[in-house]
Amino acid sequence: MTRAQTAQRPRRSARPVTDAVHAQVRHAEQVSPQIRRVTIGSDDLAHFTVRGADQWFRLFLPQDGQLRPQLPVTANWWQELLAAPEHVRPIVRNYTVRAARPEVGEIDIDFVVHGDEGPASRWALRAEPGDWVGLLDQGVLYEPPADTAWQLVVGDETALPAIAGIVESMPADTHAFVFVELPSADDEQPLRTGEHVHVSWLPRPAGAQPGSVVHDAVRAARLPTGEPYVWLAGESKMVQKLRRHLVGQRGVAKSSIEFTGYWRRGASH
């Protein structure tokens, strides 16, 4: 790729102004060895606005001994939570909508489960119908300009729900290259894609550092010329390294890259 003269990307859509709402687990199933899907629902979710392909939200989980999490009630929700006593302050994690069905007030959430390594993983493995959670809609990140020549979408297993939403929302004539690193080939999911969308599933060999396989695959890939729209998400160091590579070695404009570190090695999920 060579650096193209492109217009500055429009500013990202503002985060929606919404209230945190409670919901209850309706169903949970293991869809692959490392991914557990939990369906939550409530009357409030009948009014959930579907905003885009990688719509994300804050998930509030109850502390041990709580029936349901205490939710913030003000616009300055983070400061409100920090001011709450630690024993009642909900556990907060970020997740992506895998599927939304407002007509029945339901949302599917895919969790990458790591046994008891983190509070969200522990909760997902034990989730049963009737369990309470809370959520706060945070909007979308994926917003490619209409005149984008082609797209590059890269992530690991934590980004798979967003990647699935992105590729399944692409217009039929979209040209895109998609790279997804997974714990194993058994964690692949069927995706509905157009004929010009090329998906590379990248199982992680035993002992490999998370993010290393997709990082190496993108660096070695033969990619088209012309300015792309790039969406990167997953392990933080992988995202940072690939962004530097695309800008420094591939000549991609910084303004053409949407990037998010979903997690860091060594941190609980």
Image (cartoon, rainbow, N blue to C red):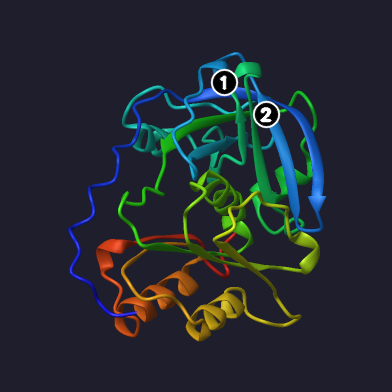
Q: Is residue 233 visible?
A: no
| Extreme residue toward the top, this view | 43
Q: Residue at x 50, y 26 (%)?
A: 71
* Tag 2 near tag 1, CB within 8 Å: yes
Quadrant (top left, top right, bottom left, bottom right) of the C terminus: bottom right
* Front position in the image: 122 or 258: 258
Tell me residue 98's x, y (percent).
Answer: 61, 41
Q: Is residue 98 above or below residue 266?
A: above
Mark 2 surroundings: few (<14), some (14-19) or many (≥20) residues within 10 A: many
* Secondary structure under the numbered disc 1 in the rendered image: helix
Q: Is residue 49 above or below residue 164?
A: above
Q: Is residue 102 above or below residue 202?
A: above
* Front position in the image: 117 or 100: 100
Q: Is residue 60 visible?
A: yes
Tell me how many marks there are. Answer: 2
The image quadrant that residue 8 belongs to is bottom left
Quadrant (top left, top right, bottom left, bottom right) of the N terminus: bottom left
Rendered image: mark on residue 40: 2
Tell me residue 5's x, y (percent).
Answer: 18, 69
Rendered image: mark on residue 45: 1
* Secondary structure under the numbered disc 2 in the rendered image: strand
The image quadrant that residue 243 belongs to is bottom left
Does label 2 or label 1 sit earlier along the sequence? 2
Amino acid type of the residue tagged 1 in the rendering? Leu
Rendered image: mark on residue 213: none
Q: Residue at x 29, y 46 (%)?
A: 12
Amino acid type of the residue tagged 2 in the rendering? Ile
* Front position in the image: 200 or 162: 200
Q: Residue at x 76, y 60 (%)?
A: 187
Tell me residue 160's x, y (percent).
Answer: 61, 55
Tell me residue 181's x, y (percent).
Answer: 63, 69
Left or right: 93 as drawn, with respect to 225: right
